[in-house]
Image (tube, rainbow, N blue to C red):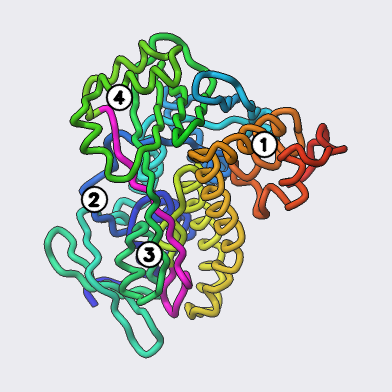
């Protein structure tokens, strides 16, 4: 072997970088291989939910995120296209101090995490590093081969962590079957200059239409727009003015802000897919984040769930170090603990997109009825909010709750906010 570490992490994204920090602080020999040449750049949407805030806070990193790049948001209003308010969700229902959604400037969280990792362990992250293949011995995976700065390097490790996204090369090398579902819709994200202070988020739903408007720090405004997958080329042919006019027809109050869209460099295209790996672990290797369980970004939990993976896996690795057991059975504890929540969030995101983006008038009526019921039902509102905030593992609605949300059965506890999740 050219090098030897306890743990090699392939991918320095939301989960890989967090895991790298946690392990290096425990003095567990760790190397993070990142294919990109440096910190992420460009436009991307970023909402840090309460569970992600908690993890960063426990690591002492939340206070290092630049204040000028953070916009705390309390209210999320859901409206019909045309403006009619259907429901308002109030993050103030959650326990302090994590009772706001934090809308962040693009990549600022990841840059903060990577800055910290590089400062605490300068040799931990290797950029421009391409995973080539897994190394194996009689016990299972025992390391990786990669190209770093164009040179092949063999790195021995007790554990290899695949944190390399939905099309994970590590998962493929492990021959772990995975269900990859490509959605028919994707997202166009834009970051625009607001003409006035904008403090509350707006979510518009209509016939095959979803438009999200989120306030950012410094009078910036994020726009999330659902479009058919593969429609970007034709949209670009129509031009930015046509797109801005389309948004203004949905939300006329922000016409001036939409008119600041003048170049496609202000936007980013987000393809959407769902990943369900049959297993997340094998002898000497484990998958985390999108490599194991990619989900529709509509859940607003993709990055957060990768961070939760990292935190929980670091605890399991502690036990592996103590027992010197890196087998699939030892690592399975991680998968068992995490499966329930990510499966619930994947299903929740799929249901929401299906109903919110429907073109069926009957389903549209039912959707609007549910929104209106939730608006006046604090119990159901809290249950939905705790799922979005990443604070619950079980589904927010039982079948009885679904009947009540549809307005078919009165809820005697509608004004009762649960004391626990």
What is the C-alpha distance between the residues marked 3 and 4?
38 Å
Q: Please give the range of residues in magenta.
A: 266-286
Along the polypeptide, which appears first: circle 1 or circle 2? 2
The residue closer to the viewer here, 30 or 233, is 233
What is the C-alpha distance between the residues marked 1 and 2?
44 Å
Circles 1 and 2 in contact, beta carbons < 8 Å: no
Question: Which residue bears the numbered disc 4?
Answer: 243
Q: Is residue 242 above or below residue 42?
A: above
Question: Which residue bears the numbered disc 3?
Answer: 162
The residue closer to the viewer here, 112 or 271, is 271
Q: Nearer the viewer, mark 1 or mark 2?
A: 1
Tell me if residue 274 is in the magenta stretch: yes
Residue in the image at 38% along x and 13% along y: 255
Along the polypeptide, which appears first: circle 2 or circle 4? 2
Question: Which residue bears the numbered disc 1?
Answer: 370
Identify the disc placed on residue 36.
2
């Amino acid at each position: 072997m050219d090098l030897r570490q306890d743990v090699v992490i392939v991918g320095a994204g939301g989960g890989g970088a967090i895991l790298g920090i946690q392990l290096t602080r425990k003095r567990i020999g760790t190397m993070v291989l990142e294919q990109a040449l440096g910190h992420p750049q460009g436009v991307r949407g970023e909402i840090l939910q309460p569970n992600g805030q908690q993890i960063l806070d426990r690591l002492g990193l939340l206070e290092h995120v630049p204040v000028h790049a953070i916009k705390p948001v309390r209210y999320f209003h859901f409206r019909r296209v045309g403006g009619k308010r259907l429901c308002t969700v109030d993050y103030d229902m959650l326990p302090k101090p994590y009772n706001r959604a934090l809308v962040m400037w693009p990549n600022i969280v990841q840059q903060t995490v990577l800055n910290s990792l590089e400062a605490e362990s300068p040799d931990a992250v290797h950029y421009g590093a391409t995973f080539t293949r897994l190394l194996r011995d009689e016990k299972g995976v025992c390391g990786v081969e990669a190209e770093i700065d164009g040179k092949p390097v063999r790195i021995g490790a007790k554990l290899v962590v695949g944190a390399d996204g939905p099309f994970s090369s590590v998962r493929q090398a492990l021959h772990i079957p995975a269900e990859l579902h490509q959605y028919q819709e994707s997202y166009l994200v834009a970051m625009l200059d607001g003409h006035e202070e904008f403090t509350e988020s707006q979510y518009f739903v209509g016939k095959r239409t979803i438009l999200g408007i989120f306030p950012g720090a410094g009078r910036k405004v994020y726009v999330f727009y659902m479009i058919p997958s593969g429609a970007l080329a034709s949209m670009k042919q129509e031009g930015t003015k046509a797109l801005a006019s389309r948004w203004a027809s949905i939300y006329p109050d922000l016409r001036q802000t939409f008119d600041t869209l003048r170049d496609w460099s202000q936007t980013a295209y987000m393809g959407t897919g769902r990943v369900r790996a049959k297993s997340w672990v094998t002898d000497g290797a484990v998958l985390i984040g999108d490599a194991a369980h990619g989900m529709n970004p509509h859940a607003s939990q993709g990055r957060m769930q990768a961070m939760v993976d990292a935190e929980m896996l670091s605890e399991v690795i502690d036990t592996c170090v103590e027992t010197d057991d890196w087998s699939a059975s030892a690592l399975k504890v991680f998968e068992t603990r995490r499966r329930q929540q990510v499966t619930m969030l994947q299903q929740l995101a799929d249901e929401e997109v299906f109903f919110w983006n429907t073109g069926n008038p009957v389903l549209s009526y039912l959707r609007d009825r549910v929104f209106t019921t939730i608006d006046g039902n604090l119990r159901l509102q809290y249950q939905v909010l705790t799922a979005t905030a990443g604070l619950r593992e079980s589904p927010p609605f039982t079948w009885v709750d679904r009947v009540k949300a549809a307005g078919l059965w009165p809820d005697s506890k509608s004004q009762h906010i649960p004391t626990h999740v």
